Image (cartoon, rainbow, N blue to C red):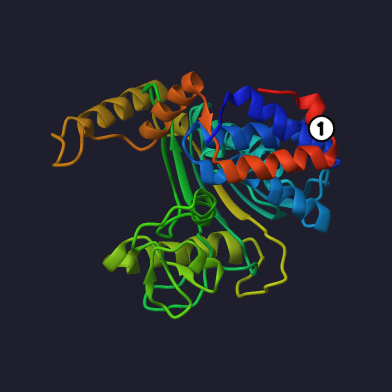
Amino acid sequence: MPVFQPEYLHKVAAHIYRAKGTPADEAEIVATHQVKANLTGHDSHGVIHIPEYCERIDRGHIVPGAAFDVLSETPTTAVVDGNWGFGFVVTEKATRMAIAKAKENGVAAFTIRHQSHIGRLGDYPTMCAQEGLIALLTADSGAGPKAVAPFGGRARRLGTNPICIGVPSNLPGQVLLDMATSAVAAGKISLARNRGEAVPLGWIVDKDGEPTTDPNDYAAGGAILPVGADQGHKGFGLSFMVEMFSGLLTGLGFGIDPQARHNDGCFLAVFDVSKFRPLEDFKQEMTEFAEFVKTSPPATGFSEVFYPGEIEYRTEQQRRKDGIFIEDETWRQISDLMAEVGVAEAVGQP
């Protein structure tokens, strides 16, 4: 399993995307988000997707350089159509617009549709939190291919439907809830398959609805389960509402169209803390709240309590120092792709 510095992986990704016709500025944005996912320990949302994104470009499912259209707008809202551009690019631009509206008017809410995968949701609420704002982001695939069975069912009817909330504080790491409402993100199944590893019991069922630990059973007609194990009705209920925000409110709809493009419909809500109370007071109290929660003595099998986002922060610090591990199969695919698009020499060796 090779180890790489983040700067090298960024160079690899950016060169490949430019070779596939992506404008240089967009290639940089996509590479930055993907490598950030690896840095924070979310390898399922990192450079493992480079071959998949290139395949989608070839099929016309991702349109580099696509227009960014604001279909309707008020002082506090906007409806954005990404025209099938890179989701990273579209959602980052929409987030900057929402930040500006929230700072001026106190709150902002956006729907975003017709864009490709936006990757790890955490990057966008983090942008807001760094500006003194609280942000909530949800994502769903509309009528695109589904991954998750509803609680009590065995066939796929929902996306992994992630939700993310970012909050400003004075802590060293970003306070950030970033979670799929399914037992696991679909990318983690792919990661386990590429690594030749079994998945934990309770993540997926096979095509007959039976529990399994073989990640290949998912691609063979199985499904991911809602988060919550025997209390999965809670994860299912949350997933249902995420799909309402990201699928129905965006106008993408619901259902299953196996031929549909992958589409991350998003709902983004942003709140300016300073319109509710002094920002510095809130940030300090948020810090003290997290520190208070961490005083709970660790349970058996645990070393300490972490606030949401703390593990990702520590992982990033460690990986910036020690490098990022990429499984052999993923690196083989990326290396083959570099040779195919003619950038191996320009990228060079690590």
Q: Residue at x 46, y 27 (%)?
A: 316
Q: Quick check: 343 above or below 192?
A: above
* Image coordinates for residue 236, horizontal then vertical, percent: 40, 67
Q: Position of residue 107 (x, y in %)?
A: 54, 41
Q: Nearer the viewer, residue 88 or 9?
A: 9
Residue closest to the eye, 163 or 110:
163
For residue 2, side relative to residue 151 (left or right) = right
Residue 209: name its quadrant.
bottom left
Q: Position of residue 13 (x, y in %)?
A: 71, 34
Q: Is 120 rendered above or below residue 296?
A: below
Horizontal side, residue 207 vs residue 288: left or right: right
Judge whether residue 269 can be spotted in this image.
no
Q: Position of residue 180 (x, y in %)?
A: 45, 54
Q: Is residue 332 left or right of residue 341?
A: left
| Residue furthest out toward the top | 321
Which residue position holds label 1? 343
Locate the C terminus by quadrant: top right
Q: What amino acid type is highlighted by mark number 1?
A: Val
